[in-house]
Amino acid sequence: MSARLDILRSELETHDCDAFVSFSPPANEYLTGFRGSTSAVLVTPEASVFLCDFRYTEQAGEQVKNFDVEEVQGTMETRAGEALARLGASRVAVEPGTLSLAQSLAFEEAFGTPVHPVKGVGVNARQVKSPEEQEKLRAATALAEAALSALLPILKEGITEAEFVAQLEFEFKKRGAQGASFDPIALFGSRSSLPHGMPGNKPLERGDIVLLDLGCILESYCSDLTRTFVFGTIPGTWFEEIYHVTLNAQLAALDAIRPGVPCREVDAVARDIISDAGYGKYFGHGLGHGVGLEIHEAPRLNQHSDTILESGMAVTVEPGIYLPGKGGVRIEDLVLVTDSGCEILTQLPKDLKVLD
């Protein structure tokens, strides 16, 4: 925590700011160790102050490191603005992606001057995971995979997408997870063409595609994986083709990951394979994203990303092909960038599997 605070103060100096404020639970946990839902973090060159209300005072006393804990009443944004004014701050940096307009207006009214948006402040350092963070990502991935493996046998004719997801979320918690890291996706049959479709009442039938995208939270860190199966019989040669194109694209992208490679180049490796096979217009999302305290965080693996991969980054690699009205495929692994390539955390097989 001390090193993270030093990095933040260095960022403030770089951007000619004399204070930082955050109301974001993941950002605040990263800086302080606090796992509650409501808090404010205030940092100046000399002071580090953590604000919470009565509900969290005892918890903060146990969890917060390197910050003075103060219990406050009323609106958190107002109290934070007043506190930084008392500390003599004049130019307050915020990460714009973590601050709502309502929070900004309330803070500025109490502080007296507008905040200074600095993209990435208090967030960029999270891209490179420490050894302890990496171990938590491994554990969260192992738990999610174990839960999925335990539940594959319940994928029988008649079970609905929503029923499977309910069982999955229960399995996560039964195994010790805090919960799902996002709303799990289970899509059967032609509904698998919806990249982020909502599980519904579609019952599983023979010949259905089964697309499962899931992850859990363990020790505050997220996991994320996707596997695509078929139930009973393969729906046709068209499906075998898009499955193998997707798998080849994913394997090639994994092979391209190493420090010093631009994220957009990794995206291009997979995208070019899918495009060359004639399915380019059916792969409309980015190749992947960072994972950590949040399920979607920097860096992004897409066509527009300027980020250069570094050892210790954790990213998903998840190409897909989605044919409207027919079905889709997505194959996703969570990986850690290493000094020489990447460590694939997800261990579930990726060969086309027929469930029965």
Image (cartoon, rainbow, N blue to C red):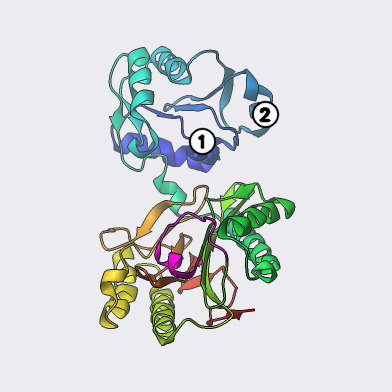
Disc 1 packing (10 Å; few <14; some 14–19; many ≥20) = many
| Above or below 271: residue 167 | above
Tag 2 and tag 1, C-beta contact below 8 Å: no
Residue at 58%, 58% in the rendered image? 137
Give the magenta range: 188-203
Amino acid at the residue labelled 2: Gln
Between 303 and 88, the one lying in front of the other is 303
Q: Determine which of the numbered discs, if any, sits on residue 114 in the image.
A: none
- Residue 93 in the image, given as x and y percentages of width and height: 34, 31
- Residue 250 in the image, given as x and y percentages of width and height: 42, 75
Q: Quarter holding the N terminus?
A: top right
Q: Which residue is mark 2?
A: 59
Q: Which residue is mark 1?
A: 25
Of callouts 2 and 1, the N-terminal one: 1
What SS does tag 1 mark?
A: helix
| Above or below 127: residue 23 | above
Q: Is residue 197 found inside the magenta-colored segment of the image?
A: yes
- Residue that protrudes farthest toward the right in the picture: 174
- Residue that protrudes farthest toward the bottom in the picture: 237
